[in-house]
Image (cartoon, rainbow, N blue to C red):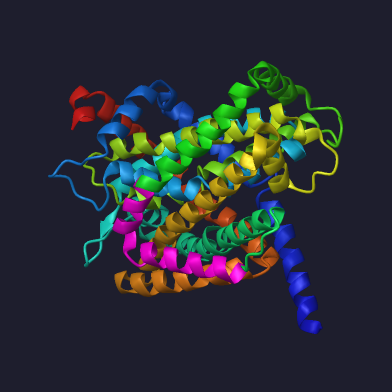
Amino acid sequence: MEGQNMLVALNSWLGDVGSVVWGPFVLIPLLLGVGVILMVGLRFMPLRRMGPAFAVMWRGRKHHPDHKGELTPFRALMTSMAATVGTGNIVGVATAILMGGPGAVFWMWVTALFGMATKFCEATLAVKYREVTPDGKFVGGPMYYIKNGLGPNWKWMATLFAIFGVIASFGIGNMTQANAVTSNVVRVFEIYGWTLSPWIVALVLLVVSGVVLIGGIKRIGSVAGTLVPVMAIFYVIGGLVILILHIDQVPGAFAMIFDSAFTGHAAIGGFAGSTLAMAIRFGVARGLFSNEAGLGSAPIAHAAAIVKNPVKQGLLGMLDPFLDTIIVCSITALVILVSGQWTAEGISGAGVLTSKAFDTALPGGLGTWLVTIGLVLFAFSTILGWCVYGERCVIYLFGHKAALPFRIFFTLVVPVGALTELELVWNLADLFNGLMAIPNLIALLLLSPVVFKLAREFFANPEAEEE
């Protein structure tokens, strides 16, 4: 009993600390503020260079034979997006609307636009300051651009980031995702009166994850390069079909988003109402949680790109928040709003809201299956991406020989997460995910002049974009 009380107390303490870290006085202003500073310093380049960035992404499906790295630029982006496009795109958006009202969606968009500048800088620095291990792995990310860019006096901060990254990888990137897959698949089977043991789902996850993860970053990149575009297109098309079927309500949904963004939203139906402060808080927080701009996770994947000029990978990095939040999250938000379910009585949670919204809008239970399949694929891809992040952090801390043991252990933890109650793990993951951002954001600010100089030189040379 005493041990149980200690766990309850620890869980409560972690929740309180996590609320402070992710609250309106620490990470929210820090993440958004750094994004604004970097966007201004880049002279709004990420917004002006969207077209060339997509062109670089298309050409990045192949790589120049003389350039060095492990993954094609496109696969490096897809590995990053594998971790970014996750349950936050389904559940996180619903949470933002339930707590902050429709106006929260607008602030998610604002966060994503400034997040493009942050991710441009992250990916650029990751390639510039990356290292090559004795066995040929191209490793990079905040721990390396802190060490190599800021110098030996900052190594303690690089080590802290790596420690936070390893812990977060087992929480937000492994156990919680596996649990989301299991609980949702079992729930859908129950809806149709079928019985499915969670152990079966856990075993399938173990096998499928192991086949991909043990193969390392090249196999993960290969799978992500196929899975991420397919799953995103599948989900977006499903959402667009719903919006087309309810096209008459779409203008009203946009009007509600913009109006509520600056006034809050009054109570209606089962919705308790929200203030302007709540719209901003939950929109920014859920937007940052969804696209991970500033957390320092994505540059770990971009560092493996087969690319010569760091700025070219930076252009791909800045597409991540746009595709994740402006496209995928917006589809979820608009479906929820046109369905009217966000004001319905008796909605018990964010996941239920999204499922009911899609199910109401599509006949014959197709909506439930669309959300479930989307969530399963998004969660599985997150497991793949975060394995890369955790492995690279372990390599920084213990050397390249620790990579394979880490991947094996990471794989074995998947079924544990699938079968375990995870409130404590969620709070741990939330806290350490947030703690990752602090050293990364400090490094981004201190190294921003380097990025600004690289960007100016790159865009001053028209031939650089074609290399």
Q: Which residues are magenta?
A: 198-225
**Image: 26 above or below 186:** above
**Image: 264 above or below 449:** above
77 or 318: nearer the eye? 77
**Image: 206 above or below 332:** below
Q: Is residue 209 magenta?
A: yes
172 or 310: nearer the eye? 172
Q: Residue furthest left?
A: 66
Q: Is residue 254 left or right of residue 86?
A: right
416 or 276: nearer the eye? 416
Q: Main structural element of the magenta stretch: helix, strand or loop? A: helix
Q: x, y percentage for residue 274?
A: 81, 33
Task: Tell me if residue 35 can be seen.
Answer: no
Quarter residue 448 falls in: top left
What quarter of the picture does the C terminus occupy?
Answer: top left
**Identity of the residue drawn at 52% across and 62% down:** 174
Q: x, y percentage for residue 452?
A: 36, 33
**Identity of the residue drawn at 67% across and 32% down:** 361
